[in-house]
Amino acid sequence: MWAHLERGSSPVDWCESNYSISPVIAEFVNTVSNILFFLFPPVLIHLFQEYSRFVNPAINVVWVLLMVVGLSSAYFHATLSLVGQLLDELAILWVFMASFVMFFPKRHFPKFLGGNRRVLAYYASIFSVVSTGFLVMHPAANAFALMTLVFPAIGYMWRELVRVKCARVYRLGLRCVAVCFLAMFCWIMDRLFCDAWLSIDFPYMHGVWHILIFIAAYTAVVLFAFFNVSDERPEQKPQLKYWPKNDFELGIPYITFKHPYKSDKNLAI
């Protein structure tokens, strides 16, 4: 166990040269590029106060888990330890599962769930625990396995965007999908074409991935929250707004309601 905590014990090493900028941080740019994971979630917790109060307070769990992802990723890239790698990958898995439980449409629930989101949370927790064990036993395949989870999420988002009648939401969805694919492109470029980036002295595509994937991830959560309320609580009339200026669509998106009211126990988890 102690060996897995040692610096450089992870089999994964990204393109950025180790300890080239700081004598104590292995991959400096890949470490500090996680800054958005710490800066944005507190703002989002504040902006989603109305959603938390009138729909589901569990939305704050997702924002906190994104901070855990940033912390785990920063620790991994600073040390390149196997424990850091596993923490990073497991945090991503739990963000996916928490979002799945919150936002998976009830109209697609199998009959044995009885339309109960708490039962879905129970089965998702079992799956997450089993998957956690698998990820710990097979760390070499983790990154590619987790990457495959992105595609079902994009597929679901696209189906919902086709159904949505709000042009503002549709535009945000298109931007989210575009940023997500650009982020995956950067991840692949860093992983498979490191020599090319080293030749132009820019081995930092993984750091760019961190920035882009956070933007795509929190935007996706905002969109899924909108879809969820539109589908299950349409009478609340959710509205997509932007901070700090609502008519500036490159700001931070969040959800408010035209007719908010207190959520019932069957919706919250």
Image (cartoon, grey):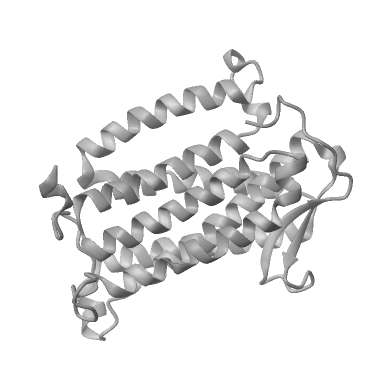
Image position, residue 164 (x, y; %)? 75, 48
Q: How many marks?
A: 0
Q: What residue is at 73 percent from the left and 46 percent from the top? A: 51
Q: Is residue 144 left or right of residue 199?
A: right
Going by the image, does 130 lie left or right of 9?
Answer: right
Quadrant of the rendering where the C terminus is positioned: top right
The residue positioned 10% from the left and 48% from the top of the image is 3
Say which of 217 and 196 sits in front.
Answer: 217
From this view, report whether residue 78 is shown above or below residue 100. Answer: below
Using the rendered view, name the quadrant where residue 259 is placed.
top right
Q: Is residue 61 above or below residue 216?
A: above
Q: Where does the image place residue 75, in percent across and percent down from the top left?
A: 30, 59
Image position of 48 with respect to 230: above or below: below
| Percent position of residue 202, x then y | 29, 82
Q: Is residue 94 above or below residue 168?
A: above
Image point (76%, 33%), residue name: 232
Residue beneath the point at 17% across and 54% down: 10
Residue 4 in the figure: left or right of residue 131: left
**On the rendered image, what quadrant is the N terminus found in?**
top left
On the image, the x and y values in percent for residue 149 come to 43, 44
